[in-house]
Amino acid sequence: MDLDASASSSVSGDAERTEAYYGVENVIDAETRFFFNTKRRIDACMNYTRPALAVRTESIKKSYMDAKSRGVKLRYLTEITKDNIDYCKELMEIAYEFRHLKGIMSNFMLSESEYIAPIVFTDEGKIAPEIIYSNIKSFVEQQQYIFDMLWNNAETAEQRIRELEEGVRADFIDTIRDPYQVQRLVFDLVRQAREEILVIFSTANAFQRQIKSGAVESLKEAANLGGVKVRILTPFNEVIKKLVGEWKPKDTCRGNNDDDSGSGSIDGEYVDGLFNIDKLKIRLIEPQLQTKVSILIVDRKYSLSVELKDDTKDTSYEAMGLTSYSNSKPTVLSYVSIFESLWAQLDLYEQLKVSNKQQELLIKRLQAHDIWQKEFINTAAHELRTPVQPILGLADVLGSKKGNIEQYQDFISIIGRNARRLKFLTEDILDVSRIDSKSLELRNEMFDLVSTINRLLDDYRKDREALSKECEISFECKFKNAFVLGDRERIRQVVHNLLDNALKFTKHGSITISLSERKTRNANEWNIVIKDDGNGIDSEIMPRLFTKFATKSEHGIGLGLYISKSIIEAHGGKIWAENNPNGKGATFSFSLPMTN
């Protein structure tokens, strides 16, 4: 560590460094720069003497205020005492969050990238004459860990101030008989919550009564506006299932903002007995698990246990029995343990249900795979037999002939075409094997899509038997060149597969290939579209169009689209398909990242 002993020296730039500053004036300047450099947050850990200093020293207070005006969030941790309570209240108006921790001796501040602290302790009300500053990342992260550990063990400033001003006992267990007092206490505890609320309702009726009283709405507000994690366990009946299941984001609290686009708008989700809206979670439990006690636990510091006197009553006041209110740690944590055990059991139950569903799905997939495998073997055998027969037959004919070979040119063309067909079938099967084993290799190079597509179409036009006499192919492109980085032959294979697919289902009409430019949020792409006037995509095939063996054609084994999808995705592109809006034919499209 290199400590700069000069009060005025500094290191320029963003290089990591550690410096010491001497003299009150230099100390205040360093703290002012620290506040000025902060963009997002400041965490301050101060002993009980520092709040008074922060309020009384105009330059420090102004730095806090300026940071707040820029949106910097201040978390302030100190020991709140009877002597500094007024200063703490004033700082609470500035801070984003304020907490109390007994016996703090350390004084330091952290931002997202900087650390500053006095080198020695000073007398009460005096600015430290020597401070240390560092922006070394590892050191700042270590100090952040220390602050977070202290912060997580602290209590809310409001609770500490209430204890000091109202003389609240350190540990207590109270029995409350007045149901009106209990209901008021429920609302107070929910409003005071800062981190977590756990609730167990005794019965479905108890939950319904608290909905009527407004307590459940307060829980939703604590979760969706206050950021408190709220979990509720409640037995259910059909009314509860319907009510909770119908809750939507619009039902959540928005304060005075009636605009649906406001910050209170959040997504709701109801799945397998667990209802989620942001930080609010409600677990519906079986009615046989209902009890005679409802429990409220706030921040794992306070518990409220309410006996159920008469579940047939319409209001909570009539249904309540005796209530136990406590901040005793053993008591509160015992209730926490009960809640967490129930929640974990229900989680395991739901996981078991999901696991059983997954098993059933896996069995169905295996059965489907077995069917597809058999279909593939039958189709492949037929497809391989078709080109083999003319090759063998015509080869025998040629073997018995004598004379000029040119007169047998038609036989040779048929043999060549069927041999190529065999080659394509074999390559498709090998490609699927490579894709499934994740060993498909790309030979990337810079190449031109325009010339690649034109050469492919030239090959089609040379082989007239590949085209129906009543089917025309055209290429629409306004670009002279369209460069991409990828495997030229693999992309050619994709276009070939899509074109072959269009030709199979288009006996009359036209096939149009088009190339266009498409701008996305992150990059520019080339968009290749192959549109035909054929039969369109069968509704049975559409859900599994790009999977293996998905075909309704009398020719082919249903691997081309699966291979094409894998090739395009390996290039960082996308492929999709749809039937044409006019009900005639289909359109297959794929995109590839554009290379400048």
Image (cartoon, grey):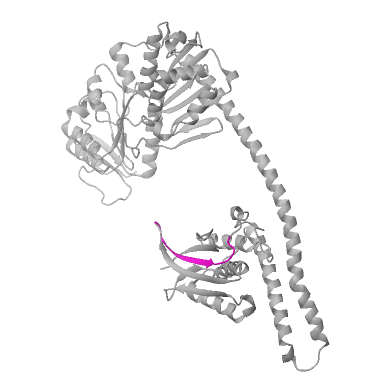
Report the residue that reaches farthest toward the right: 400
Residue 58 rendering spot, x and y as whole percentages: 16, 32
Q: Is residue 42 left or right of residue 522?
A: left
> Is 60 included in the stretch rendered in magenta?
no
Residue 227 rendering spot, x and y as whole percentages: 38, 31
Position of residue 570 relative to residue 156, above or below, is: below
Q: Which quarter of the figure is the N terminus placed in?
A: top left
Rendered residue at 51%/63% (across/down):
589
> Is 526 included in the stretch rendered in magenta?
yes
Q: Which quarter of the figure is the C terminus placed in?
A: bottom left
Instruction: Give the residues drawn in magenta, as a range.
Output: 521-536
Position of residue 564 relative to residue 246, above or below, is: below
Residue 49 rendering spot, x and y as whole percentages: 25, 24
In the image, 475 versus 334, the foreground residue is: 475
Task: Tell me the quarter of the picture where residue 257 sits.
Answer: top left
Rendered residue at 65%/64% (across/down):
431
Residue 574 rendering spot, x and y as whole percentages: 51, 59
Is residue 408 visible to the viewer in this orientation of the structure? yes
Is residue 84 visible to the viewer in this orientation of the structure? no
Number of marks:
0
Position of residue 384 relative to residue 75, above or below, is: below
Rendered residue at 58%/27% (across/down):
346
Position of residue 198 relative to residue 592, above or below, is: above
In the image, 331 versus 282, the foreground residue is: 282
Q: Is residue 80 left or right of residue 383?
A: left
Report the residue that reaches farthest toward the bottom: 403
Task: Tell me the quarter of the picture where residue 26 sits.
Answer: top left
